[in-house]
Every structure is written in structure tokens, then in C-alpha cells.
Amino acid sequence: MARIHLVLAAGAVLAFASGCASAPRPGSGDIAFRLFWQGAEDLDLHVQEPSQEHLSFMLRRSESGGWLDVDCNAAPDRICDNPVENVFWPEGKAPEGEFTYWIELFQIPDPPKTVPFTVQVLLGETVVRTETGIVSPDARNSPRYRYRFRRADMVR
């Protein structure tokens, strides 16, 4: 049975199911980047860590311990009712420095349309930043967002 998780983001409550095959409970730790959207489109979350290693569907684990652990809508058998993607570093593993993250519309729907999204940065279980945007066939990539991670900023 799927569990529904509610997340408060920028004044809106976002729900995601942890029961579909590709959406187990998203991991958290030092830092996590979590993407939400609605629909069957395949959006991809990209995170570049301070070493310039780039996590996405192409590289799901980094040498520092980063991990893309949830990748919804990547294939017809992995469509989620409330899609989410998640990249995180377990506790004690995240490198300090500047992370760059962005969203890509990987598969263009038919008919083409815009897809709104919300992406959050979490330290532990605390949301410390929220970005909203839209990707479309004309603008397949979101702007590149940046977050400087310092272990001293962790909420204890």
C-alpha cells in the first residue's frame, strides 16, 4: 500500500507517494535536493557537487557518497502518481562548498506543454531553500541554482 507524504513548499502542500516502484521514501542526510512535479513527463534532477562531479540519471552515485535514490517517470513501468526525484548525501558524507542544481525536461510530452516544478534543498529533514519554475519544449532546462553547503549550517 502506498504511503502519501505531505511536504510544505512555498505555501503549497505537495504530496508524493512512496509506494510506486520507483519512489521509495527519499533519502536524507547532510544535504538533499528534492524535485516535485505533476504528470507523466520525465523531469530529471541534476546536481553538481563542489568537486564538479555531476549526479543525474547518467551517474547515480558519486565518489563522495551522493546518491540519486529516487527517479520517477524514467520509464513506462515507473510512472508515479505524484512524481519525485531525490539526490542526497548521507550524514557525514557531503562535501562542503557550492552545489549547483537544475531541472531538465528529458522527454517532451505529446502534445508539448510546459511543466511546473518545485525543487527543495534540505539539511537533514529541514527545508532550507525552495525554487519553483517551469520547463517546456522551448526551455528544456531550468536556470542553474546554487547552494553553498557548510557543515556549520546543519540544524541540530
Image (cartoon, grey):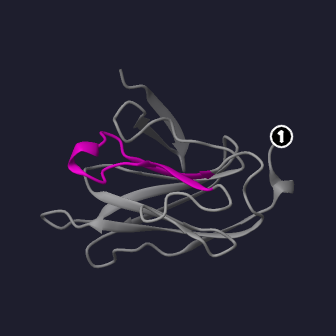
Q: Tell me where residue 120 sits by quadrant.
A: bottom right
- Where residue 10 appears, as percent x and y from the top left, is 54, 50
Mark 1 crowdedness (10 Å alpha carbons): few <14, some 14-19, many ≥20 = few
* Image mark count: 1
Magenta run includes residue 7: no
- Where residue 123 appears, as percent x and y from the top left, is 70, 49
- Where residue 98 appears, as percent x and y from the top left, is 71, 71
Q: Secondary structure at mark 1?
A: loop
- Where residue 44 appears, as percent x and y from the top left, is 40, 62
Magenta run includes residue 71: yes
Span colored in magenta: 66-88
> Looking at the rendering, in which quadrant would you find the N terminus?
top left
**Outermost residue to the front:** 63
Figure check: 95 above or below 88: below
Task: Kindly identify the amino acid type of the residue bearing the numbered disc 1.
Answer: Arg
- For image coordinates 27% across by 50% down, the residue present is 39
**Outermost residue to the left:** 111
Figure check: 16 above or below 149: above
* In-image side of 87 versus 117 (left or right): right
- For image coordinates 37% across by 25% down, the residue present is 2
- For image coordinates 78% across by 49% down, the residue present is 92
**Outermost residue to the top:** 1
* In-image side of 86 versus 63 (left or right): left
Figure check: 31 above or below 107: above
Q: Which residue is mark 1?
A: 156
> Looking at the rendering, in which quadrant would you find the C terminus?
top right
Figure check: 45 above or below 123: below
Q: Tell me where residue 113 sits by quadrant.
A: bottom left
- For image coordinates 31% across by 54% down, the residue present is 74
